[in-house]
Every structure is written in structure tokens, then in C-alpha cells.
Image (cartoon, coloured by chain):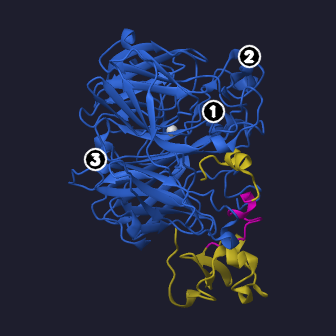
């Protein structure tokens, strides 16, 4: 579900070509992460909190309202890289239909 | 959404696959034993809505109640916990089916599980008013486009390891009109089959089982290369006395495309493997699984019913290795047809190893339209960080020409960590997609999918108000994810 935001609540920031993987590897948007709490202190209390890094339309976005889901980097990578070292047998044992 | 969803598409693309909700009890269990998950893209007026949830089988609910995996190796009750003995252990993780206005999730070891088309909630097993007597139901029933009947079967029909195969005809209203009880020469995976206007063809080979291997705690199937591939042909309106078995060389016969009867000649079109495709169903002679033999080609197999020979002629139609999850314009099933559609790995296309890992050559990066009249292959390339799942054919509304419509299917974007839906003009694959719908998350697993026009299902998922992808609703999130996107088990909850 996408929360409708208005006015100065939000702003697309940083390099618009930045994607999640690039964000994780620190190859773009690096300045966003410097000194910026990814999840603001009061976010868990339910009400609007301070600015936080979020994602919208697959782009990083600085959510000034605290209403969006904060971006939480996954622990570990979730792409093809972890399985790229597997041989054909181990890959097919893991995911015969590659989904 | 990038591009435009064709305005004449009004229906639903349903996908069924397996995902471990709890980790497997044994590390070597088959991934085909993972919990069934059904998801659906509802499409209307150029808009798309998505929903997905686990199929709540008795097994799923029993595990949820205990908070852990209680079922052991693939289709081996000797390895299940005592507490769940006697429960239906199916995972309903293979294919969707729409018939008589109803929606089902299928797996070949149990009855169909009926699904609410609006919510995807599980309603329970369905035995067609008690007239369907087999304990099992194939994941590949065939809808006769001429009569609207469903032809179907179950193997191991009277219980574990039984050599009974029951064949059924179910009319367009969901009533069983015909049952024929058959025997198979050896108990094997009868995963798919084929039908023509005159005959049914029962296809299998290689996989074997026994009470001994089950008592030893092994998965249900092993591969025995000494076993012949088998095709049983019977008149559609015949009985068991009319069933005739043909034998061939070592073949892994998982999926078919089409079959046609012309006089005494029956022709089967099928993307079969040379040998064992599944390494988790190991070779019974103890030899290692050989990936070089797990090669799949479109084959044409011709049976001469006027001959006394019990063999067939086989021809490989295209030199291209393909994925065996192939589709055709299903309006032409049982009739002579020109086009086959399937995914394949095109080695001439790029793959971005930097962003998606070194999977070059091992991802299905293309759909192909294989023209069986000219031998030409026209292809669609999905992207340099992607792998495709099985496509489905969507007839263009009002069209009657074979292949006039769209291909729809999902693709895993291995760099962006998400699922995307692509829609391609089936007659213009090389021109790229008409629309791409980018889910902001992974859209759940798929073995098989199918497109159903809205009028084929009663009580279909309503379209929410809004634009573009207006709903993204995962009803139950997996706790353990052993699939391609997260091998570490450390992903986001
Ligand atoms: Fe299948």
C-alpha cells in the first residue's frame, strides 16, 4: 500500500539511477547514508517521526513525514550473486524452476 | 508500469509454485515438496492488481499449529512425524486450474484444492460431488477446446505405490461423465500426458519407486536408466482393453505440448529431456547426476497404430535447447498447430554479472516462438539481469487465428531483487514487450501459470480503485526462504 503524501513531505533525492543493490554496495547515494538514521527514533511508536530514508517507485526517497515504510537493508544479498558459485546440480536442487 | 497493458485483456494470470514455509525436515528433500503458494495478477482496463498467499492444505495448517516442519521426505509417509500420519500430505504446489467456474491449485499426489478466486483463500479438496474416485489428480488436466470437457486422470490412484491410473472425463459443468480404470506397466511419475480428438496418450519414463526405498526413508522417486520410456495410447471413448503400450529409449518425459490423431497415425509434440532432469531424484545405480544429459528439445514422436511395432519414430524439431515448460495457443489443443512458445537460455544475449551474479548461460533470458512449419524461432529478450518463468498464452479477444494474442509471464530481476510481469505480442516477440509491471518485491514462486478470461471464473478478484499496480498484497509472508533470491536465510522478514 502506498501512502499519499503532499507538499514538502517527500522528495526524490540523490542519483535517480540508484537502485537497491547499488545502495547496498555504497556505489551511489552514499551521501544519503552519512549521518542519516535509516529508521528514525520514534518510527516504532506509530506517529509521524523525523526524516527517514524510504523507497518509492523503486527510487530512494527522503520521506520527511515519517509515514512511509522505512528502508531496511536486507542482511545479506538477495540476488543472483549468492548462487552464482553453485554448480548445475546444486543450483537445480535449490531452485529447479529458477523463481 | 512501463508501457501499456492491452485494453482487451480482462482476466487473471494465476501462478502456483512452492516455497518452504518451514525448512525441510531433511536437507536432501526435493524442492518439489515445498509449500504451495498461489498468486494472481488481475488485469482489467489496462490496470493490474496482485495478490498472493499460501495454499492452506491440512499439512500447512498442521505445521502452522506446531510451529515447525512435521513432514519428511518427498511423498514418503514413513518419514513424517507420528502426529501427522494419515493427514493429506499434499502441498498443492504445481499448477492452477479453472473449470466450471471454479479455481483450483493442483499437485499430482492428491485431489485438487479449491481456491476462492476473489481472495485466494483455500476452500478444501474437491472430488466432483463424490464421483471422482481416484485419490490423486494430475497437475495437467486437458480442456478440450472443441467440447469444453475436461479430460484428466490420477496415478497411484488407489493409494501409495499403486499401479492404478484412473482416467476421467468431466463436463463443462463439473460433472464426472466417464471413468476408465487402467494399469501402468511400472509405477512412475506420470506428470503430464496428451490428448487428441480420438485418443489419450499416457507418457512416462525412468523414474521408479518401491516400498523398500520408502522404508529406507528416501524420497519417493529415483531414476533408473534401464527402464524404458512408455507411451500408452487408448481411444478416448474406449476401455482398458483398448490401451496399447509403446516403448522407447531412456527419456525424461515430464511435459507435453500437443498431440494429433490422423487416421492410424498419432503424433505427439513434446519438450522431453534426454535423461533425468531432477538431481534430487537420484540415480538408483548410485551414479552421480549428469547435467549433460538433462537437455531438453522439442520432439515430434509418431506412432503407427496400424503397425504391430511397439516403438515410435522420434525427430528433434529444433536444435535449440529449451525449457520444458512450454505453451501453445490452447484453442488449438488436440488439433494440428504451428506454434510452440517457451522460455530458453539464449547464449548470444548479454548478462550483467556485475549486478546479478555469474549466472550467464543458466538463466532463461528469452521467450521463443517456435514455428513448426518453417523451423524459424522468433525471440523476446527480457533483460540482462533477468530469468523468466513459464509463459502463458492469452488469446486476443475476438481473434480466431492460431497464435494471435499475447504471452504473459513473470521474470525474476536478479539485480533489483523483485518480480516483474511482462506482456508480449505473441506474433511480434522480437519487438519487445508491450508492458512491464514492476512489483516492488518478490512475487512468490511459480512452477506453472495460466491465464483465464474473466468469464471463466465466478467471483473473480475485484479490481481496486486506483491506477497502475494498485494493490500488492501478500497475505502470508514466508518465514524461511530457500529459493533463489535468498540462499542465506538472512533476508528481510
Ligand atoms: Fe508440470
Residue underneath mark 3:
B455
Crowding around mark 3 (Cα neighbors within 10 Å: few <14, some 14 to 19, many 20+) is: few
Q: What type of secondary structure mainly makes up the magenta span?
A: loop
Please say if A65 is above or below B17: below
The disc at residue B59 is 1
Crowding around mark 1 (Cα neighbors within 10 Å: few <14, some 14 to 19, many 20+) is: many
B366 horizontally vs B268: left or right: right
Q: Nearer the viewer, residue B84 or A76?
A: A76
Residue underneath mark 2:
B212
Q: Residue at x 63, y 46 (%)?
A: A96
Tell which circle, 2 or 1, labels the residue nearer the N-terminal end.
1
Of marks 3 and 2, the one in the foreground: 2
Letter of the chain that mark 2 sits on in the rendering: B
B172 horizontally vs B221: left or right: left
Crowding around mark 2 (Cα neighbors within 10 Å: few <14, some 14 to 19, many 20+) is: few
B398 horizontally vs A12: left or right: left
Residue B78 horizontal/vertical position (percent): 73, 21
Tell me if I can see residue B43 in this picture.
yes
Residue A3 horizontal/vertical position (percent): 52, 74
Tell which circle, 1 or 3, labels the residue nearer the N-terminal end.
1
Quadrant that contains the N terminus of chain B? bottom left
Q: Are marks 2 and 1 in contact (CB under 8 Å)?
A: no
Letter of the chain that mark 3 sits on in the rendering: B
Q: Write down which chain is painted yellow.
A: A
Residue range (magenta)? A69-84
**Real-space CA distance between mark 1 and mark 3, rounded to the nearest whole angstrom:** 32 Å
In this structure image, what is the colour of chain B?
blue
Residue B148 horizontal/vertical position (percent): 27, 34
Instruction: Label 2: state its secondary structure.
Output: helix
Amino acid at each position: 500500500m502506498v501512502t499519499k503524501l503532499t507538499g514538502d513531505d517527500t522528495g526524490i533525492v540523490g542519483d535517480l539511477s540508484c537502485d537497491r543493490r547499488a545502495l547496498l554496495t555504497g556505489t551511489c547515494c552514499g551521501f544519503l547514508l552519512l549521518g542519516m538514521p535509516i529508521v528514525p527514533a520514534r518510527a516504532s511508536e506509530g506517529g509521524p517521526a523525523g526524516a527517514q530514508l524510504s523507497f518509492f517507485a523503486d527510487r530512494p526517497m527522503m520521506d520527511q513525514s515519517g509515514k512511509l515504510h522505512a528502508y531496511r537493508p536486507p542482511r545479506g544479498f538477495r540476488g543472483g550473486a549468492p548462487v552464482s558459485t553453485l554448480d548445475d546440480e546444486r543450483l537445480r536442487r535449490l531452485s529447479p524452476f529458477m523463481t | 508500469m512501463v508501457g501499456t497493458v492491452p485494453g482487451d485483456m480482462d482476466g487473471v494470470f494465476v501462478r502456483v509454485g512452492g516455497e518452504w514455509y518451514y525448512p525441510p525436515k531433511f536437507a536432501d528433500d526435493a524442492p518439489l515438496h515445498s509449500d504451495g503458494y498461489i498468486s494472481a495478477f488481475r488485469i482489467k482496463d489496462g490496470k493490474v492488481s496482485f495478490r498472493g498467499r499460501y495454499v492452506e492444505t491440512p499439512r500447512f495448517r498442521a505445521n502452522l499449529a506446531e510451529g515447525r516442519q512435521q513432514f519428511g521426505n518427498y511423498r514418503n509417509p514413513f518419514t513424517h512425524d507420528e502426529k501427522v500420519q494419515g493427514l493429506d500430505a499434499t502441498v498443492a504446489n504445481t499448477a492452477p486450474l479453472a473449470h466450471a467456474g471454479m479455481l483450483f491449485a493442483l499437485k499430482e499426489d492428491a485431489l485438487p484444492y479449491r481456491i476462492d478466486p476473489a481472495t485466494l483463500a483455500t476452500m478444501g479438496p474437491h472430488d466432483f460431488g463424490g464421483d471422482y474416485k481416484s485419490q490423486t489428480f494430475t497437475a495437467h488436466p486437458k480442456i478440450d477446446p472443441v467440447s469444453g470437457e475436461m479430460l484428466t486422470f490420477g496415478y497411484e490412484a488407489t493409494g501409495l505405490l499403486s499401479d492404478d491410473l484412473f482416467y476421467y472425463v468431466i463436463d463443462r459443468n463439473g460433472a464426472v461423465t466417464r471413468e476408465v480404470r487402467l494399469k501402468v506397466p511400472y509405477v512412475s511419475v506420470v506428470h503430464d500426458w496428451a490428448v487428441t480428438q480420438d485418443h489419450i496418450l499416457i507418457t512416462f519414463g525412468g523414474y521408479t519407486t518401491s516400498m523398500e526405498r520408502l522404508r529406507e526413508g528416501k524420497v519417493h522417486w529415483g531414476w533408473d536408466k534401464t527402464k524404458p520410456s512408455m507411451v500408452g495410447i487408448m481411444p478416448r471413448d474406449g476401455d482398458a482393453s483398448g490401451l496399447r503400450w509403446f516403448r522407447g529409449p531412456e527419456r525424461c518425459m515430464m511435459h507435453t505440448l500437443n498431440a494429433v490423431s490422423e487416421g492410424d497415425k498419432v503424433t505427439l509434440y513434446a519438450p522431453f529431456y534426454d535423461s533425468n532432469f531432477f538431481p534430487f531424484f537420484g540415480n538408483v545405480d548410485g551414479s552421480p547426476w549428469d547435467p549433460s544429459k538433462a537437455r531438453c528439445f522439442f520432439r515430434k514422436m509418431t506412432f503407427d497404430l496400424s503397425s504391430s511395432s511397439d516403438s515410435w519414430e522420434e525427430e528433434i524439431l529444433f536444435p535449440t535447447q529449451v525449457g520444458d515448460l512450454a505453451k501453445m495457443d490452447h484453442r488449438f489443443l488436440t488439433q494440428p498447430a504451428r506454434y510452440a512458445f517457451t522460455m530458453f537460455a539464449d547464449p548470444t544475449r548479454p548478462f550483467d554479472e556485475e549486478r546479478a551474479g555469474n549466472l550467464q548461460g543458466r538463466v532463461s533470458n528469452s521467450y521463443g516462438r517456435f514455428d513448426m512449419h518453417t523451423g524459424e524461432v522468433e525471440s523476446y529478450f527480457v533483460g540482462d539481469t533477468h530469468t523468466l518463468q513459464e509463459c502463458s498464452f492469452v488469446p486476443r479477444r475476438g481473434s480466431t487465428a492460431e497464435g494471435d494474442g499475447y504471452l504473459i509471464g513473470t521474470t525474476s530481476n536478479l539485480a533489483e531483487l523483485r518480480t516483474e510481469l511482462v506482456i508480449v505480442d505473441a506474433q511480434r516477440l522480437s519487438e519487445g514487450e508491450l508492458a512491464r509491471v514492476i512489483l516492488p518485491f518478490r512475487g512468490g514462486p511459480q512452477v506453472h501459470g495460466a491465464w483465464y478470461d474473466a468469464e471463466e471464473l465466478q467471483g473473480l478478484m475485484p479490481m481496486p480503485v486506483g491506477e497502475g499496480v494498485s494493490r500488492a498484497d501478500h497475505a502470508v509472508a514466508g518465514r524461511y526462504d530457500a529459493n533463489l533470491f535468498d540462499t542465506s536465510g538472512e533476508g528481510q522478514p
